[in-house]
Image (tube, helix red, strand yellow):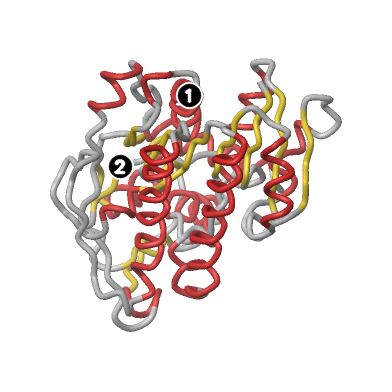
């Protein structure tokens, strides 16, 4: 099969590209390298099954010509990361809305199946748990840039589902919960690589807020296995799936674990949210996925825990120096 992977130079996208080529598929990546990095794809450069196109999902003509040439579209391109969304809300909104619209329009025109990468941010500050695919969304004011990513991805999901219902487009939707691992960078607000990097350099680990907020972390290798199984499954068409690990840990405990596991001398310091993100920032206290649906439909479950995640991120960061 030939796949178009938008955002293929990004963190999850690049790992998906590696896995597709490794199993014998060919891949065309469309990426403008705004948040992705070209060296994430170094292992594929020169491979006859791989092609890189530098460009934007906002370029409708380019998107149209690329979608026409492939068998299936995996749409990972998006403005991501809390810092980026808070810093450039308008640009992020336009990328996440118009870009997805362009992809869906082209996929529909040529009848190409599409996987949409969505996010647990969809649920907003719904602190119930575990969250299943039908759980309510609880959001703050639309005037707060913090929630604009959630808004945009929710509209992306709605558009994809209605293209499926009204135009028969085969779509699959994946909501990723805190996917982490090698190639992820800390400066978009991703907490695990940020902690690991600080611990490796003996710098303080900055915990935002009280640190009592809890998260679940899924190794990118597990997430990629889920993506490959979903794009191969006819039963997944027209459905949305949570992809994540359901083992919960507080951010405070995570910081201690990283310091201990890496044998670091780093201190842990508490930073008020307003100092990190600006006044009025809102966060969710808990985010735990219910992954029973994906287990029942395709038999997927995560295999790698936090120890593997910390070790693999540390190994990756050490290899960069």
How many labels, in total?
Answer: 2
Residues marked 2 and 1 touching at CB (< 8 Å): no
Which residue is depicted at the point 77% across and 46% down?
53
Return the x and y of residue 87 as percentages of the image width and height. 50, 75
Q: In this view, does 99 lie above or below 2?
A: below
Please tell me which residue lies in front, 41 or 70. 70
Q: Which residue lies furthest to the front in this view?
A: 166
At label 1, counting other C-alpha atoms closer than 10 Å, the crowd grade (few under 14, some 14-19, many 20 or more) is some
> What's the CA distance linking mark 2 and mark 1?
18 Å
Quarter-wise, where is residue 237 in the image? Answer: top left
Task: Give 279 or 105, whichever is nearer the viewer.
Answer: 105
Q: Residue 225 shows which numbered tag?
A: 1
Q: Which residue is drawn at 64% across and 54% down?
A: 57
The reply, left or right, for residue 241 in relation to residue 318 is: left
Image quadrant containing the N terminus: top right
Q: In this view, does 64 lie to the left or right of 259?
A: right
Give residue 256's position: percent from left, percent from top. Answer: 33, 49
Q: In which quarter of the image is residue 172?
A: top left
The residue indicated by pointer 2 is 216
Q: Where is residue 9 in the image (x, y as percent from the top left)?
A: 66, 45
- Report the residue at 26% width, 34% height from top: 246
Residue 137 numbered mark, or none: none
For numbered disc 2, what is the local secondary structure?
strand
- Estimate the x, y position of residue 279 in percent, counting from the top left: 33, 83
Q: Left of 266 or right of it: where is 146?
A: left
Q: Is 135 above or below relative to 300?
A: below
* Within-10-Å neighbours for mark 2: few <14, some 14–19, many 20+: many
């Amino acid at each position: 099969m030939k796949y178009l992977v938008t955002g293929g130079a990004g963190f999850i996208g690049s790992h998906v590209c590696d896995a597709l080529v490794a199993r014998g598929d060919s891949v065309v990546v469309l990426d403008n390298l705004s948040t992705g990095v070209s060296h994430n794809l170094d292992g594929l450069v020169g491979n006859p099954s791989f092609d890189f196109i530098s460009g934007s999902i906002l370029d409708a003509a380019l998107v149209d010509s690329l979608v026409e040439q492939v068998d299936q579209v995996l749409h990972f391109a998006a403005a991501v990361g809390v810092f980026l969304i808070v810093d450039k809300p308008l640009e992020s909104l336009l990328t996440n809305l118009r870009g997805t619209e362009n992809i869906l329009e082209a996929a529909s025109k040529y009848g190409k199946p599409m996987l949409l990468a969505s996010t647990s941010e969809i649920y907003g500050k719904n602190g119930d748990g575990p969250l299943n695919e039908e759980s309510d969304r609880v959001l703050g004011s639309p005037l707060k840039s913090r929630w604009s990513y959630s808004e945009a991805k929710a509209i992306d999901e709605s558009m994809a589902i209605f293209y499926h219902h009204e135009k028969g487009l085969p779509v699959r939707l994946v909501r990723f919960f805190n996917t982490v691992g090698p190639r992820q960078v800390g400066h978009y607000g991703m907490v695990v690589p940020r902690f690991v990097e600080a611990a490796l350099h003996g710098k303080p680990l900055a915990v935002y807020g009280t640190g009592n907020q809890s998260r679940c972390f899924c190794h990118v290798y597990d997430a990629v296995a889920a993506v490959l199984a979903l794009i191969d499954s006819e039963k997944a068409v027209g459905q949305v799936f949570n992809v994540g690990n359901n083992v919960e840990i507080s951010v405070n405990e995570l910081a201690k674990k990283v310091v201990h596991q890496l044998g670091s001398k780093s201190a842990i310091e508490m930073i008020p949210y307003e100092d990190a993100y600006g006044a009025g920032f809102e966060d969710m206290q808990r985010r735990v996925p219910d992954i029973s649906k994906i287990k029942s439909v395709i038999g997927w479950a995560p295999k790698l825990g936090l120890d593997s995640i910390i070790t693999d991120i540390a190994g990756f960061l050490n290899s960069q120096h």
